[in-house]
Image: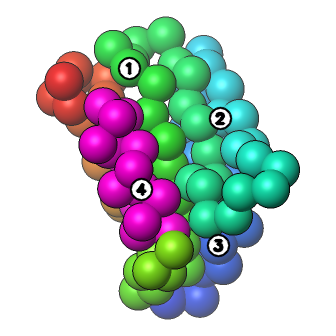
């Protein structure tokens, strides 16, 4: 499938698939009463951390409210990734499994 035709749902499905391939889980993150939280929380054995992931359609960027939420999480020491292609997802897993995101 051409990257430009990917939907956000397909990007999220790839995140879930890659987490399972690494023996982990990509939890769907919802927070009642709080909008703009990242889509997924990754819990994967080879990671040295538990990152948050925002999935987007190719070329899309987080909304201003999502950016504010990501900034709050990062300021608290969390790692937040924004991915919009399969290649970025694969890169993210490579970085996390190799401990490059410490």
Residue 26's mark?
Answer: 2
Residue bearing mark 1: 49
Mark nearer the N terminus (4 vs 2): 2
Q: Could you give the CA–CA distance between mark 3 and mark 4, rounded to whole angstroms?
A: 18 Å
Mark nearer the N terminus (1 vs 3): 3
Secondary structure under the numbered disc 2 in the rendered image = strand
**Magenta-drawn segment:** 66-86
Secondary structure under the numbered disc 1 in the rendered image = loop
Is residue 98 depicted above or below 54 in this figure? above
- Farthest right residue? 32
Residue 100, percent from left and from top:
16, 28
Residue 50, percent from left and from top:
46, 24
Residue 8's mark?
Answer: 3
Residue 17, percent from left and from top:
65, 40
Q: Nearer the viewer, mark 3 or mark 4?
A: 4
State left or right for residue 58 relative to residue 1: left
Mark nearer the N terminus (2 vs 1): 2
Q: Could you give the CA–CA distance between mark 4 and mark 2, rounded to whole angstroms?
A: 18 Å
Structural crowding at the residue carrying mark 3, measured as other residues with C-alpha within 10 Å and reported as few (<14), some (14–19) or many (≥20): some
The front one of 1 and 75 is 75
Residue bearing mark 4: 70
Q: Looking at the image, can residue 91 be seen?
A: yes
Q: Nearer the viewer, mark 1 or mark 3?
A: 1
Magenta-colored stretch includes residue 74? yes
**Quadrant holding the N terminus:** bottom right
| Residue 24, quarter of the rendered image | top right
Q: Could you give the CA–CA distance between mark 3 and mark 2, rounded to whole angstroms?
A: 15 Å
Q: Could you give the CA–CA distance between mark 2 and mark 1, rounded to whole angstroms?
A: 13 Å
Q: Residue at x 55, y 63 (%)?
A: 55
The front one of 63 and 99 is 63
């Amino acid at each position: 499938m051409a990257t430009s035709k990917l939907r956000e749902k397909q990007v999220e499905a790839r995140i879930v698939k890659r987490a399972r391939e690494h023996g982990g889980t990509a939890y769907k993150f919802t927070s009642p009463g709080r909008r703009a939280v990242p889509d997924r929380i990754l819990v994967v054995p080879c990671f040295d951390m538990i990152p948050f992931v925002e999935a987007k359609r190719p070329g899309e960027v987080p909304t201003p409210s999502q950016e504010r939420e990501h900034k709050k999480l990062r300021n608290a020491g969390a790692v937040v990734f924004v991915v919009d292609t399969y290649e970025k997802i694969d890169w993210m897993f490579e970085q996390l499994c190799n401990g490059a995101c410490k």
